[in-house]
Image (tube, helix red, strand yellow):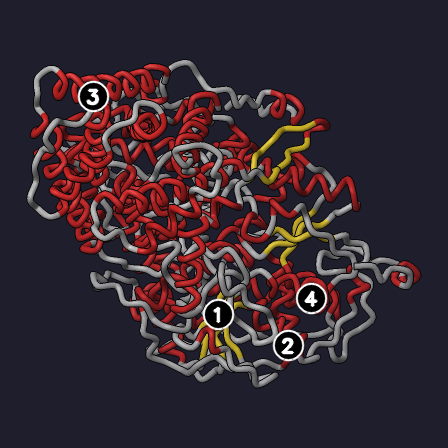
Amino acid sequence: MNAAYLYSLVTVVVLGLIAYAGVEAAGLDVLFGVIIPYLAFIIFLVGFANKIIDWSKSAVPFKIPTTMGQQKSLAWIKQNKIDSPYTTGQVVIRMLLEILLFRSLFKNTRTGFGAGRRISYKWVIWLWLFALLFHYSFLVVVIRHLRFFTEPVPFFVSFLERIDGMLQILLPNIFLSGFALLAGALLLLVRRVFLPKLAYISRPADYFPLFLIIGIAVTGLMMRYLSKVDVIRIKELTMGLATLQPSIPEGGISGLFYVHLFFVSILVAYIPFSKIMHMGGIFLSPTRNLANNSRAKRHENPWNYPVKTHTYEEYEEDFRDKMKEAGIPVEKE
Amino acid sequence: MAETPKPDELFENIDHGMPDEPWEEVPPDLSEGRFCYPTKKKNLEYLDMPTTTKDEWSPADAEWPIPDNWKEIIHEGFKDRLEKYRSLKVFMDTCVRCGACADKCHFFIGTGDPKNMPVLRAELLRSVYRNDFTTAGKILGRIAGGRPLTRQVLKEWFSYFYQCTECRRCSVYCPYGIDTAEVTMMARELLSLLGLNINWILEPAANCFRTGNHLGIQPHAFREMIEFFCDDIEEITGVKIEPTFNRKGAEILFITPSGDVFADPGTYTMMGYLLLFEHLGLDYTLSTYASEGGNFGLFTSSEMMKRLNAKMYAEAGRLGVKWILGGECGHMWRVIHQYMDTMNGPADFGETPKSPVTGTVFENAASTRMVHITEFTADLLRNNKLKLDPSRNDNKVVTFHDSCNPSRAMGLLEEPRYVLKHACNHFYEMPENTIREQTFCCGSGSGLNTEEIMELRLLGGLPRANAVKYVHDKYGVNMLACICAIDRAALPPLMDYWVPGVDVTGIHEMVGNALLMEGEAERTMDLRFEPLPYAEETEEDADE
């Protein structure tokens, strides 16, 4: 298990060094600034679409929601509309709460063996909290970065920046989201390394994206707060990418930026082949996105096929005499 | 099999520490007592299922009797199921190993075996999926979490997918709704392709196919057993009941698990149903052909489930009933609620179920035409159609065990409670995190209630038993009510072991005790022939 995270950490560090050396020593600005980002983006688009199509192609033979609350049955019994949805509208609400607020994770408990041979189940929200911190700060960071790919910058990006930068104590303005993202990722990592059960189930595929995201956050924060990079030139490069007229700005950009960009490229290209696809999978999860109304509305199984059954006639054939003797009515005397 | 240790000893030995070796390198424990006995070949043959290459074998054997091209069979079977079940594909791809499910499984809590953490149970299958079906797994192999299918992996599947009771508790906590029940079902289907099944599941399935019920009760015996209960009822209440069998033109067909006909304490629940129907003067019939509510096909394959379930609609159609009423059973209701209509529907008989007593129309069962007995009885109570004396149950301090399937695959939570609270005066809930959608399995579901793994079952049932112990110590609970035939078979030994002094009952046994029947003699005994509580005790307690 230790090896799993060391592998991943070393891989990410090596990737960073490759990008840095590639640009600073070998002058491969075009490779790291244009070719790889484009490639990564294409792999992401094709891979992501492929995966979703692949999932969608598989049938949903049965309606199997996990019910977590009272079903709709008798009029006077209060149905739990969110956890046991009966209509599509109720399913949408359940899904929104799941996707936007990680509702199932919020229910998490920790099992403990206490004194007097008592097993206890304590409500714990840490995982939920860390996950929320991580995902939302990531979202804000991604939206803020739209500034680099749009001209003029859309109002919602500037608006979000204003909220994100409320803590105006230093220059340059501090964006909370970047630090929150780093903190979130670190907390998830610490959990994974130090909780024995979690360490035992963790694989390189769990550590690698975490280290990659930590790498992205660290290089991003460094550029913004420590080694001032030339933002004007970066925007020249990114606008070039966005408008399909890529060019490397004159005078070049610091290697640190290319490390950041390379990490992002790797992450983006990695998504379709990794567990990060959970962002798409959650929408298609049959235990969450189906209504609990299967007795009221018949669900069709596209591959339902006839099966061999033991018909009543065969049954009566087997037991007719005994049935007659016992006074059980039969079809054929 | 070694003697089961004393409860203290067994409890103290539970270790949740993680081993030093990675789980991939830990072989499954296939020593005697740790596995369910494989099925007899005759059951496989009778059901036209793939067989093993040897008639007699044991999971403890080094070499398993499987065909030479077994890898190919599994691979093709896996591929087929990935196309047929989106659930499988999505659940194989989306797990992030966040660990939320890890300590939610009763088998993990009880055994401390890391592969009983739902996440690892699924990884057993997922690792092969990655290796065989994903780009990353094909290129990166182990680093991407891939693992080639080997005989050891197969043994691991057999061990751990028969240590999962398909209770769905983990899926409640999973942020993506990954349902290990679904994963286990797929794995069991794959094992079935090689003839690797357990006898405790296949024998009932074969019985059910032939005789209509798991226990292999033939029609005349089925009738005799019911009539035997009627004699008991007459002795206890003075009321003579004469139920009908296979009667055409009845309004309602009643189907309950055959466990209720066969073994205590389920039989008392059966007597409760009979009393209730007599009390109402219900126009119903029992069937010897559709004489099984449960469905061990669910624990085998979707095809077997469909084959066994087909009898219900066929018989309802043949008899010309208006709708079907279903007894208390857990997995039976998963099949009826989530699968039956899809598999064997649309129903070509009858109409939307309507209570002949209250006129209530069960719109929630409009399509399947099948109503749960606690829905039916709750409606009766709400409309004041039952005369009950709950004080007859005053010697019973009751708690309610939500069975896995009615709670997490149906949402039947309030109906049984409503009925129970009308049938008795002393009712206490177990702690919040152990009931309703968070309920713990009895440890013997999905066909695992077989003797040879008793110790595993006691460990798997520990979380449930421990919660019962809490209310037993705190409120003096001495009766555990449930709505599942497997519970009624599995919970008594579990209680005897961990919480002696607690009995197990079905909801309708309690109803049967409390029902004031027309023309009944003064009752002195409950349905178990045990004395009713003294009259003076009944006055003082209106609590709960």
Residue named by callout 4: B512
Crowd rating for badge 4 (residues with CA inside 10 Å; few <14, some 14–19, many 20+): many
Residues behind callouts 1 and 3 on a single chain: yes
Q: Residue sitting at 35 percent across and 68 percent down? A: B341
Q: Residue sitting at 22 percent across and 51 percent down? A: A55
Label 4 to label 1, Cα distance in Å? 27 Å
The answer to whether residue B351 is above or below residue B217 is below
Label 3 to label 4, Cα distance in Å? 73 Å
Q: Secondary structure at mark 4?
A: helix
Q: Secondary structure at mark 2?
A: helix
Q: Chain of mark 3?
A: A
Crowd rating for badge 3 (residues with CA inside 10 Å; few <14, some 14–19, many 20+): some
Q: Give the amino acid at mark 2.
A: Leu
Residue named by callout 2: B380
Whole-percent x, y for residue B41 in the image? 29, 40
Q: Chain of mark 4?
A: B
Residue named by callout 1: A326
Whole-percent x, y for residue B200 in the image? 42, 42
